[in-house]
Image (cartoon, grey):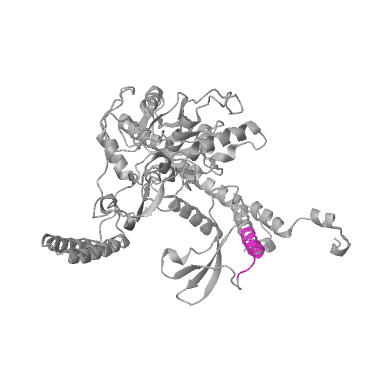
């Protein structure tokens, strides 16, 4: 190959030449190497030596880092497959307490008793000192490997009537059994079958949709306001469905679920359920499930445009207009100077009104799909692929950039979400005359930085993957550790010493502009070379396991 002389090339010819860094990134993608590695400096406290380590970014978005996104997708598929058709109860019993843990609890009891005695004596200053000591002891309790808290709730929980709505059908309730496994069925030849369910739940219709395109037939009559509120509170509806499902099933139902976008841009749920129930019963549970949003009224606009509430520090307010909730200031009516009600005050008024109605009631739609699935069948593998189909994309990435109607449909939905309150702390509450929870200066309606208001999320701010605690009896980090252990054993490499001595290494981020930091291209080249050596070693081991002869040169190169 003859070298290219840059001096003989025109500008147009140079522009057609690929950039070396772009080629390195493409090669990294092809080899499954993270293209946005985070550089950390690791100090070995035993030897005193330090080295730079490239840590994968761990992104779950394919538009950010395709290799990391695909790796996370495979990890989720393994998690789903491992817990779906378990034939034994996962071990959930906590380990027995150690002597040090018991001593800490006894010490905490003594300090609590002294603190209570000081409080009864009315010595306010000493009570604060004892509270600080208790807080330090609670931190030691958590560091000792105990979960939970001994202090209890710091604020009372708000509650409303739990009576079911008159327009919702009643659900049967069965006695709970202490198991996470579903029913089994015995075939004619004595074989035992343990079926499970694959469920799809959708939201109701907001207007007629063009078939195949997912855009409204008439956008002017499409109910974008209801679609926005349903998307905002969809995660709460899913939680309510799981509660009802467990009450009716009579056992601790375990699930692996993913939230994905429909063509009409509404979120819907795919759920793998361990165990089985009659299809008619599951559909009845979905039809009877609802969630009521007990928030202040958000339909009447009080402040808009340039007419917005103004911020005033509490030090400048009269004595009777300040609120003892920790805020440093309040928002006032720009015309009257009246302090707007705080979030807690607005909820108190709502709770005292016996005729009040919830801000919004969300339900599932009529389209409910329930399928029975057996372990180890092609249907089970297909359902797992379907569950993880869109995990590397955001809800908004399903848009067709070449379809103006779909872009307009998404823009209308985002505009409907713009002034819709997404949480108690959303600045949009100022538009309706209520101070957000934990109000701060500079809040402006329509400029909420919450996840739900971003176009790529289309109103849904919850988690994309929902996994019950007893699904596989492992966290996602433990599943990742299992895959890492298998790879290290296959490569014949030693495990990380931090697994046995977590205090050996000290990790620090490498500051920007560090003179010793190699370029991104050089780091990618080193990571690609390392990945190719690993792959060659694995291929050599597979060939040896199949009884194939491997040339000595290839074996040395792989090692």
Residue drawn at x 56%, y 52% is: 68
Q: Nearer the viewer, residue 457 or 67?
A: 457
Q: Position of residue 96 (x, y in %)?
A: 26, 56
Report whether 279 appears left or right of 209: left
Q: Is residue 259 magenta?
A: no
Farthest right residue? 8
User: Where are the magenta residues, as a range?
Assistant: 517-532
Q: Is residue 523 magenta?
A: yes
Report whether 167 appears left or right of 49: left
Residue 277, picture quadrant: top left
Q: Position of residue 164 (x, y in %)?
A: 29, 27
Report whether 476 appears left or right of 407: left
Residue drawn at x 34%, y 42% is: 89
Image quadrant containing the C terminus: bottom right
**40 to 175, vertically: above or below:** below
Question: Does any portion of residue 389 appear in the rendered image?
Answer: no
The mark tally for this picture is: 0
Q: Position of residue 279 (x, y in %)?
A: 41, 24
Report whether 544 appears left or right of 7: left
Q: Position of residue 257 (x, y in %)?
A: 45, 38
Q: Nearer the viewer, residue 23 or 211?
A: 211
Which secondary structure dominates the residues rendered in magenta? helix
Residue 528, picture quadrant: bottom right
Residue 53, picture quadrant: bottom right
Q: Nearer the viewer, residue 227 or 380?
A: 227
Question: Does any portion of residue 226 appear in the rendered image?
Answer: yes
């Amino acid at each position: 190959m003859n070298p290219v002389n840059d001096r003989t090339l025109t500008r147009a010819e140079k522009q057609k030449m690929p950039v070396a860094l772009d080629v390195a990134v493409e090669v990294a993608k092809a080899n499954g190497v993270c293209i946005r590695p985070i550089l950390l400096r690791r100090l070995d406290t035993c030897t005193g030596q330090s080295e730079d380590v490239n840590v994968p970014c761990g992104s779950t978005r394919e538009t950010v880092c395709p290799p990391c996104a695909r790796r996370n997708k495979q990890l989720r598929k393994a998690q789903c497959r491992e817990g779906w058709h378990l034939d034994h109860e996962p071990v959930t019993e906590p380990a027995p307490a150690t002597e040090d843990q018991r001593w800490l609890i006894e010490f905490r009891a003594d300090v609590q008793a002294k603190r209570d005695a000081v409080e009864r004596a009315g010595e306010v200053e000493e009570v604060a000192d004892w509270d600080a000591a208790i807080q330090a002891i609670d931190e030691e309790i958590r560091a000792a490997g105990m979960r939970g808290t001994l202090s209890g709730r710091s604020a009372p929980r708000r509650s409303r009537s739990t009576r079911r709505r008159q327009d919702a059908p009643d659900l049967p309730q069965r006695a709970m059994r202490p198991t996470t496994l579903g029913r089994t069925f015995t075939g004619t030849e004595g074989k035992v079958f343990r079926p499970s369910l694959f469920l799809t739940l959708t939201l109701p219709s907001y207007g007629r949709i063009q078939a195949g395109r997912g855009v409204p037939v008439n956008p002017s009559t499409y109910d974008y306001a209801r679609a926005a509120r349903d998307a905002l509170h969809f995660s709460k509806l899913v939680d309510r469905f799981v509660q009802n499902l467990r009450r009716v099933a009579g056992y601790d139902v375990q699930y692996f679920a993913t939230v994905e976008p429909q063509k009409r841009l509404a979120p819907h749920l795919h759920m793998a359920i361990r165990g089985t129930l009659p299809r008619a019963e599951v559909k009845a549970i979905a039809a009877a499930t609802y969630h009521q949003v007990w928030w202040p009224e958000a339909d009447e606009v009080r402040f808009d445009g340039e007419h917005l509430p103004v911020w005033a520090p509490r030090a400048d307010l009269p004595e009777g207009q300040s609120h003892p909730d920790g805020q440093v200031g309040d928002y006032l009516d720009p015309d009257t100077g009246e302090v707007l009600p705080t979030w807690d005050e607005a909820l108190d008024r709502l709770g005292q009104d016996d005729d009040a109605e919830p801000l919004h009631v969300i339900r599932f739609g009529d389209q409910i799909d329930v399928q029975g699935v057996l372990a180890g069948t092609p249907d089970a593998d297909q359902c797992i692929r379907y569950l993880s189909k869109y995990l590397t994309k955001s809800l908004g990435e399903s848009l067709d950039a070449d379809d103006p109607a779909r872009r307009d449909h998404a823009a209308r939905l985002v505009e409907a979400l713009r002034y819709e309150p997404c949480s108690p702390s959303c600045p949009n509450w100022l538009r309706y005359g209520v101070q957000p929870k934990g109000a701060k200066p500079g809040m402006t309606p329509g400029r909420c930085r919450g996840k739900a208001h971003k176009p790529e999320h289309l109103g849904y701010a919850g988690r994309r993957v929902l996994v019950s605690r007893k699904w596989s009896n492992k966290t996602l980090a433990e599943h990742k550790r299992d895959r890492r252990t298998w790879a290290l054993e296959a490569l014949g490499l030693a495990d990380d010493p931090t697994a046995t001595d977590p205090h050996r290494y000290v990790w620090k981020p490498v500051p920007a502009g560090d003179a010793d930091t190699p370029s991104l291209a050089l780091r990618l080249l080193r990571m690609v070379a390392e990945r190719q050596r690993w792959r060659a070693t694995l291929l050599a081991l597979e060939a040896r396991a199949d009884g194939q002869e491997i040339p000595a040169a290839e074996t040395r190169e792989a090692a």
